[in-house]
Amino acid sequence: MSEMWFTEQHAPSGSSVGFRVRAKLHEETTPFQTIAIYDSTDWGRLMVIDGCMMVTSRDNFLYHEMMVHPALYTHGAPRRVVVIGGGDCGTLREVLRHAEVARAVQVEIDERVTRLAEIHFPELCEANADARAELRFDDGVRYIAEMVPGSADVIIVDSTDPVGPAEGLFNEAFYRSCHRALGEGGLLVQQSESPIAHLELIRAMRTAMRKAGFRAMATLPFPQPCYPTGWWSCTMARKGPNPLDVFRAADADARTFPTRYYNSGVHRAALCPPEFLRVALSES
Amino acid sequence: MSEMWFTEQHAPSGSSVGFRVRAKLHEETTPFQTIAIYDSTDWGRLMVIDGCMMVTSRDNFLYHEMMVHPALYTHGAPRRVVVIGGGDCGTLREVLRHAEVARAVQVEIDERVTRLAEIHFPELCEANADARAELRFDDGVRYIAEMVPGSADVIIVDSTDPVGPAEGLFNEAFYRSCHRALGEGGLLVQQSESPIAHLELIRAMRTAMRKAGFRAMATLPFPQPCYPTGWWSCTMARKGPNPLDVFRAADADARTFPTRYYNSGVHRAALCPPEFLRVALSES
């Protein structure tokens, strides 16, 4: 066959997702991982890290909007936001769309992810020069551990899968640091893999978050064609007694920035778990 | 590589979905199409028609529940149901879970689909012997055209893609037949492909449904890992002035049969379109 495809065969789930590509534009091995960039026929650019699809130009809006807007419209006044990982800068861009945000720090361990995003995904990096943004290239686990207690309103963990560099972002010790760094009512939100393929991981994350002191948890599913099974999720956890199923819907409806997936109906919908997820998570 | 994978490369969207397989269990060419059955490592059996993934044992519950329960809980008293296509019998099984249903006719053009489902997906066929069920192997377009006017409460079009044998199920003439066959308040529900890859098809379907006399339309997205982009939809259309956003939620909550995806929250959630879909469908 004369066509070229980039295909990620995801061994744990026995499923694969692929895209037809025109060319591999770049590949390099950093101290942390191997990053490749492809040009696809229908999905724009692809960023692939260690063989795992990270971002496509066409469908990243689903992930980035859901990692940001539900949490920021749940917090009453999100002024101080920290993004752990998120090197493609798409999450940071969505955070900075919120006028309430006074400061957003992105802590990505691998500067090359951001430098390649600036070249191949310039639209995701368009807020990098915002005066409220600070781009750090550092270890997110250490950064959170060293934060002044109560100094963040929202922490967004936008990482790769829980193997390799991101492994330390999926355990109780890290969540304990997050809990301490957050102010009262503060929110932690983390990508939590596929509802259908990674149910045990989601349960383990929630158990660890609860042990770390978080009381309310919500796992929000959303479609994501470029990830295994095409179905993904983020999990929100909140410090203090405030619930997670009440949000600033009127503010979401009155938003002045563009979204392609998120709206207040989608936010409410994401809080309605599929039956198997409701049952599986009712004890965790 | 010693592993075997079945991969569907979906040319129109430039994306692929695949599953790791152990063996091809069967393949035959019928007068209508070529049907293959694979045994997969993580998704149970796969049914593939003309190279397109149709059903896996593991994820078909998403599709089958969403093709049936929203429509049947929207109709006030769904007694007479017709399934066009649906040869794997999973849709028929979900229909027959509703005690209100007095008669369910399945009209599948290719009897071999059902015979192979009986062997390889016996769980989907477990309601085939229900006294209320009638399995016909016939042309669905002709069947609907010849129905007594007003004699169906719900028509479910559970077909392959709009090419090949299913082409006649995606046009105004067919929808006009459906409209005539339905009683007042009756519902047509049809699988309507991927919200992100087939937006033009969804718009064209809704336009044709409207021209055929349907007034209210709703497109409900749901995850479906085995279909291109992992994100799929069904579109409901209703005869008469009744709305589509009101349903028998109390009955859905009180259901006595098992579901794995559907519940009343999921039903409400599916009626909240993502922003791009809301905008795209606001004129159709």
Image (cartoon, coloured by chain):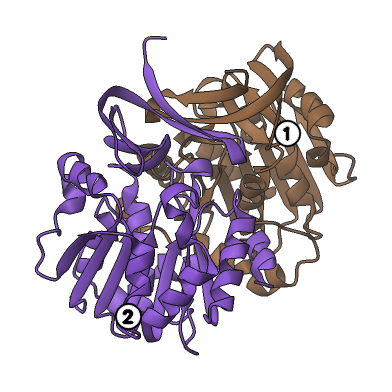
Chain colours: A brown, B purple
In the image, are marks 2 and 1 on the same chain?
no
* Dot 1: element: loop
Mark 1 is surrounded, within 10 Å at the Cα level, by few (under 14), some (14 to 19) or many (20 or more) other residues, namely many
Given the image, on which type of amino acid does mark 1 rest? Answer: Asp
Q: Residue at x 35, y 71 (%)?
A: B144
- x, y percentage for residue B206? 57, 69
- x, y percentage for residue A239? 54, 54
Q: Which image quarter is the C terminus of chain B in?
A: bottom right
Q: Chain of mark 2?
A: B
Task: Decide if residue B253 is in sight here.
Answer: no
- x, y percentage for residue A224? 56, 44
Given the image, on which type of amino acid does mark 2 rest? Answer: Asp
Q: Is residue B46 left or right of residue B160?
A: left
Q: Is residue B266 left or right of residue A233?
A: left
Q: Residue at x 53, y 49 (%)?
A: A223
Q: Which image quarter is the N terminus of chain B in?
A: top left
Q: Is residue B81 left or right of residue B70?
A: left
Mark 2 to mark 1 CA distance (whole Å): 50 Å
Mark 1 highlights which residue?
A: A88
Mark 2 highlights which residue?
A: B153
Q: Residue at x 39, y 65 (%)?
A: B141
Vertical position of residue B250 compared to residue A121: above or below: below
Quarter of the image for residue B133 reads: bottom left
Mark 2 is surrounded, within 10 Å at the Cα level, by few (under 14), some (14 to 19) or many (20 or more) other residues, namely many
* Dot 2: element: strand
